Amino acid sequence: MLFFQSLISGILIGGVYALAAMGMSLVFGVMNISNFAHGELMMLGMYMAYYLFTLLNIDPFLSLLIIMPLTFVFGYVIEKTMIDRVMDHPSENQILLTVGFGLIMSNSALLAFTSDPKILTTSYSSSSIALPGGISVSIPMLLSFLVTCILTAALYLFLAKSRTGMALRATSQNREAAQLMGINVSRMSAIAFGTGTLLAASAGAMIAQTYYIDPFAGHIFLLKSFTICVLGGLGSVIGAGIGGIIIGLAEAMSSAYLSSDWKDVLVFILFLAILLLRPQGLFGKKGEQ
Amino acid sequence: MKKKLLEIISLSKHFGGNTAISNVSFNVEEGLIVGLIGPNGSGKTTLFNCITGYYSLTSGSVMFDGHDITRIKPDKACRIGMVRTWQRVKPLGNLNVLENVMIGAFSKTRSAGESRKIALAQLDLLGMSELSSNTAGDLPIGLKKKLELARALATSPKLLLLDEICGGLNNTETLELMETIRIIRNNGVSIVFIEHDMKAVTGLCDRIVVLKSEQKLVEGTPSDITGNHDVIAAYLGKGYKHA
Amino acid sequence: MKQSVVVIALFAAVMAALPGFLGDNPYIADILITILMMASLASAWNIVGGYAGQFSFGHAAYFGAGAYTTSILLTTLNPGIPVSIAAGVLVSCVIALLTGTIVFRLRGHYFALASIAVAEIVRLTVLNLDITGGAQGILVTKVSFGSLDLNSKVPFYYAMLFLLLVTLGISALIYRSRTGYYLLAIREDQDAAASLGINLYLFKNIALVISAAIASVAGSIYAVYISFIDTSTVLPLRLSIEIILTTIIGGIGTLWGPVLGAVLLVSLAEALRSNMIGEYLVNTGMVSEGSATGAFLKSNLAHAHVLVYGIITVLCILGLPKGILGFFRRKGEA
């Protein structure tokens, strides 16, 4: 039964990891930038959900409708005002810019909200559904997973069917060629970054009931998102989706059968193993560059 | 019969399902200048990348100076005496011209003083001494190409692989560079030469290999090639007759 | 080269004489030791990040590995300080080689990502093991070294100064040697570097190992100096990032940039932490003490130094991507 319990919780948490990692992968694919502020963008979503709930009494899942457009605009503006200026710089400068931006975000949050962790508790935060065999499924996690599925489907349709989505994919395939074909790649970058921000913040909002909310809560997710992106192949959005589930499962299984102390270590060792054995990731298109 | 320096034996390279080079073979004998021509996308640069170890071959083999170098790494290729330049120039942009050339010279010496001497001599030979302290990234394209040549020569190669070294040069510069290349050959360096400009190639090369659609179309002396109807039809077109 | 030697010698003389002028002020001594330590760490990072262009985001791992190895040995077998430091270097070099072996075959962002992963593995492992004291950390007491008084700050000042001078010496030597030119070539263009006979894998590893060894020694000295270490003081991601920022802000790829960066950032952090800037603003009347802004600054500036680092980083990258020193000597000396 431990196995099935871990299987279910692994898949549920993996879905949220997947959502965050898809945002990072989209940014990487379109802009070829590793966004080190991704964790802070998740943290932003967590605080937004927290305050929308405590101040305005809006349910965290409902608040996504407010959080998503706001964070998209936020990401779009950040791209236009800062990241766009370093698009032709060496990748180290781009990484550092996002590191600096992340430091500004987390430490502003520290000044604004202090380091005391906040806990978002709704009427159903600790409820769960009991399945036969003593397996319990947490309601917030189940809802997160369902919303993640909807968002993933929406993202997939957007990328596959819409004009903008196709332009994004073309930019991701080959930036120069896309430009020659008349695609406004600079605008695509801003849209990709806005969408990435939206996805990260949504993931943050959805786990706000499950994790402590503090200014540095995003760090661990930054590293996990990187692991997932490399596992799925940097730049592959679908790969990131599947990678997220795999990492969620690996964590749940190692907590159950090894010890929960070592589950993060296991994730990072997995990360190095992928780099060693299959650097292009399981579904990668951009391998050795 | 001269000694074969480079032997390319049935070399093929596929990228996924796409064929970039199919079953190409030719030799480069010591002391020769061999021209490699062909339309865009015929696999010339890919061939260089395969020979020098940037790509691994799908099949076939490469021999250099009697040794099998099919699976060689790029840095090793340079150390055994085979050096290349780049179609899209790759200057070490933030370093100056002298430093760029010194880095080439370090493949033959560990001493910084010694490598500076070699580099200065090389720059002098190419008439670039005055540019020594200019930043490489700021040079115009023609001088960047020349810098790549100087840097490559500083490694004292046996075989020089030049990838469109005349691209972006005007006529006078091209003629000058051709003369320099002739001098380099006379100093005992063999050369393979990718070029778009037919005139440059025919004037200089001892032998020409024509690639078309990933395959070797024909190989021969410049006069063979310019008289070959297939080549004229496939590559040179009518323009060349009038040129 | 000669010029560098002269400047380093001058710097050494001034710094060696400095404690004599400042007298016995433990507060100032502590700041100076921190500056020397950050300068050593940033200079060490500069060898692999500035010269070879391989950005390590996990240098805290080497600092922490040195600190922990030395502390564990001193509190258990106690083979003496030099042996304990050497053991730390060995451990750090092994970690560096493992990292390099795995990721230096790859290009692009992989090294940056993998270096964080390795640092996190080291941090979490230390946190989960018994021998390292887990979350409790290690108390490093009853350490002696000859007749030196290790309760005084002076020996540590000179130890860190010595480390910095050695690091600067190594950097200057590398910079003007074949290895240095090769590292610069790798930074500029890896394909071109390989075509000129440079074994990318080998030279990147050389740079990382040298850099890790220096960072490790800094960690060892720090552990003995501070007498207590835990993962949040010697292994945090924050430290790795501060090391990079110090180098970037001072001038990446230059000999003195990291030193300048350490002087600026450590002083700035200290001024903020001790509320000097907040008080200055109030005392000079620029902000009134009673106002909301005044109260906010007074209570919060002390925690804001990392925020200020972030702002400086963003401004540096957008405004002067080569750092302060790089800005003054843009051309020719690279």
Image (tube, coloured by chain):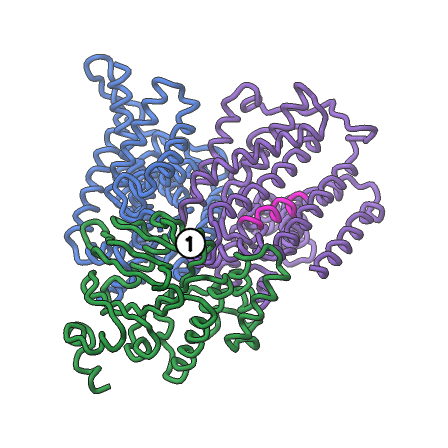
Chain colours: A blue, B green, C purple
Seen from the viewer's position, the closer of residues B157 and B27 is: B27
Q: Name above or below for residue B199 compared with residue C288.
A: below
Seen from the viewer's position, the closer of residues C5 and B192 is: B192
Q: Find residue C163 and report its horizontal and vertical position in percent.
A: 70, 43
Q: In this view, does B103 lie to the left or right of A20?
A: right
Q: In this view, does B220 lie to the left or right of C96?
A: left
- Does the magenta stretch mainly form a helix, a strand or a loop? helix
Q: Name above or below for residue C239 compared with residue A100.
A: above
Quarter of the image with the C terminus of chain B in it: bottom left
Question: Which quadrant of the figure has residue A162?
Answer: bottom left
Q: Name above or below for residue A17 compared with residue C334.
A: above
State how many labels appear.
Answer: 1
Q: What stretch is highlighted in magenta?
A: C37-48
Residue A93 visible here: no
Residue type beneath disc 1: Ala
Q: Find residue C102 and report its horizontal and vertical position in percent.
A: 43, 38
- Residue that carries the numbered disc 1 in the rendered image: B77
